[in-house]
Every structure is written in C-alpha cells, then in structure tokens.
Amino acid sequence: MNLYNKSFFNGAKLSQALLMLLGFSVPISTALDNVLLALLLISGLIICGRDALKISYHNPVAQAAILLFGILLIATLYGVTPFNEAVGILGKYIDLAMISLFIAVMRKNQDRDNALNGFLLAMLFTLILSYLVGFGVLKAQSWMWPPTNVDNPAIFRHYLTQNTFMALAVFLALLRMRESADTLKRFFWGAFALMGIINVLFMMMGRTGYIILLVFISWFAWTTLHRHLSSKNKPMDWRHVVAVILLIVASIAGAYSFSSRLQARVDLAISELSAWKPGVRSNTSVGDRLEFYYNALQISQQHPVAGVGTGGFYGAYEKQAQGKNLWIVHNPHNEYLMITVQTGLIGLSLLLYLFYTQWRYAPMLDSAFKQDAARGMVLATMADCLFNSPLLDHAPGLLFALMTATFYSKLKTDQRHG
C-alpha cells in the first residue's frame, strides 16, 4: 500500500513538473510543446484520468470548453471535407479538451503558480534576447524566428504571437506588482512590466499586440481603482470612471506622440482601411484581412445554422472566391468567423458561451489576482479573436488552455457568482 502511494505521488509530481515545463515551452518551442503534451497526456491520464472526467462534468469552465470541442467533433461528420482533413483541423482545437486534464494535474496552489512562473520565466528570457537583438548587441541566430532583426526582434515565435504573449506577461507582472508587499519584488515586476510595454509598443511590429496591451492595461487600471475604493469602503462613481478613461486616453496619446514608429504603423493601418474595397484584390495587410472577413461572412450566410463542417473553411472560401482573383486562405484570421463558417451559429454560440462562463465564474476564484487575471484574459482573448484565430493556432491555443486551467482550477462553487 505504501509502495502504491509512493508511486502515485511520484506520478503526480511528474505530471506537475511537465505542466511547469509546458508553461515555459509554450512561448519558445512547438517541438518541445508536443513532447511535453504527449508525456503529460500519458502520465496525466494514468494518474488523474478519472478526476479529469469528473472535472469535465463539474467544473463549468471546463464543461464549456468541452462543449465547444464537442460541436467541432460533431462537425467532422458532415460537409464535403475529407474526414482525415477534418480530423486534422479538429486536432488543432484539442487544447480545449485538455483543460480538464490540466486542472486535474494542478492539485495545489504551488502547481498552478509553477505553470504561471514557467510562462513568465520564458517571457523574461524572450524579453532579454529581444532587447539584445533590438539594440544590435546580439546578432540574429539560426534558432530565432526568421527574419528577426533590429527593427522587429522576434525571438522564438512569430512577431504577432510574441507581441500578444508579451502583453499578457506585462499584465501578469502588473498584477504581481500590485499584490506584492515586498519592495524588491514590486520593483522587479514593475521593471518587467515597463520593459515589456516598451518592447510591445516601440520595438515590435505586431499591431494586434498594441490592442491587446491596451485591453490589459485598461482592465488593470479599472480593477486596481475598484479594489482601492472597495478597501476604503467607497463606491465607484462617474468621476472615477471618467478619471480612468482620461488616464487611458492620455497614455495612448502620449505613446503615439512619443514614437514615430508607432505613428507610422497606426497611420498605415488607417490608410489601408480607408483604401479597401469589397471584391477588389488587396495587397495590404489590413485590406487582406477585411477581404477575408467579407468573404467569410458571405459563406456564413449561406450556411448559417451548422456551417460547412470542421475543416471546411478552405474549400468553402475557394468556392466563394472563384473567378474573383482573390487570395485563397486557410482561415480568415478571425476566430469568430472561423468557428461560424465551420459550425454555424451553434458553434459561435458555444464559443461565446465559453467566454461568458469564464467571465461569470471569475469572481468565484480564490484570490484577487486570479479574479482580475482571469477576466483580463477573457477580454484580451475576445479582442484577439477579432484579428486572429488564437484557438486554432498552436501556441496561442495551448496558452489559452493552460492559463484557463491555471486560473479556474479552484472555483469556490459554494459562493454566489457575480
């Protein structure tokens, strides 16, 4: 009996260590992610498989993720896409089903902190290397993301991915700075956040990162003021709301005025937006995306309820663009449209239900840090879904699943939710 308990303990420790390593690997290496996921799946199912099934039923956030994955699974059974191709696309959403297993492995607060610390450590490593490349101290290496350079120092991932990941790291650093009572730790997290903000706004090219960072910082400012007033037993009124809005507007204006590079990127986006015309082939980043959105909406109107089936986007888009001299793409760079084209309004409703469930149950988490971090992640993910397909893409989808498990693994379900 003792030997069995010891084996169980060692197995659980192995799964927890793999989870921490996974937090570190997500921003760095797809190959390492896949190895860790395979090992975690084997060890986790052996040690925590039964618990994972219970969590899929009892944890409302895990349940919502399973429902979304379930409709994508059902959608492999209809449409004209070959079954093997449909399953290939379904596999890109497997992280949704892994949330329950991640939660089952996270038995203690330390396990959850380790996964979070692994991610922040990887982003600190990325940040340091990005600065070294950006200032010309370190030349681009073969293992860095090509074509990284001083003007766009992406290190391990595509610059769009690094920018959104860095925005999340900044937000988590700000929350840790706010929660810490130790002066040295507050200084470290504040410096981390400041250097990350500079990296996102003034060193990298990804405009989505600007928006995600704005969402995170706005939410941080709002929750920090709200918690400060609550600690003083003072209600938040319209003057506080106006003050937060003015602070955010002033910060945006200051950043825009300070950086000619940021101005150029924003002005370019505005000019590309105004130049776009439906049905006319575009050669600009913004114009291309608007064309993707426009055609995806046309497809959705033709298959409104259940969509064209999982994996059917490319074929449907090719048919929609036939004879129009347009780019043919595998996804519209918009998760709402990607889900809707494949699974119709049923799938879109379940995607929104997942976000709603995360928002609804965030106040039931066991710390102010997790409550604010969880809702911030929901807002940022919803914004990201307007410009990318983060649940479809490997690294963003895996990070979403891992952070969801980290934040929602300990719900105080006996309390009333807000």
Image (cartoon, rainbow, N blue to C red):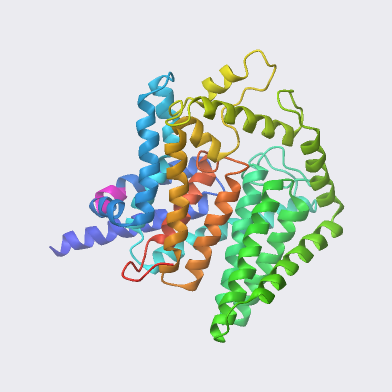
Q: Residue at x 62, y 51 (%)?
A: 164
- Quadrant for residue 293, please give it: top right
Residue 188, given in percent of the width and then of the height, sits at 64, 72
The range drawn in magenta is 43-49
Residue at 85% x, 60% y is: 258
- Residue 144 is situated, as x and y percent measured from the top left of the image, at 65, 43
Quadrant position of the N terminus in the picture = bottom left
Vertical position of residue 281 compared to residue 117: above or below? above
Task: Choose between 2 and 264: the one closer to the eye.
Answer: 264
**Viewer-closest of 204 and 372:** 372
| Front residue (pair 114, 132) | 114
Q: Principal SS element in the magenta part? A: helix
Residue 49 position within the rendered picture, expressed as x and y whole percent measured from the top left: 26, 50
Relative side of 92 to 246, left or right: left
Q: Residue furthest top?
A: 323
The residue at the point 73 percent across, 23 percent down is 281
261 is within the stretch colored magenta: no
What residue is at 28 percent from the left and 56 percent from the top? 58
| Location of residue 379 by image quarter | bottom right
Q: Position of residue 101 (x, y in %)?
A: 34, 51
For the C terminus, the quadrant is bottom left
Q: Is residue 197 visible?
A: yes
Please say whether residue 47 is one of the residues in the magenta stretch.
Answer: yes
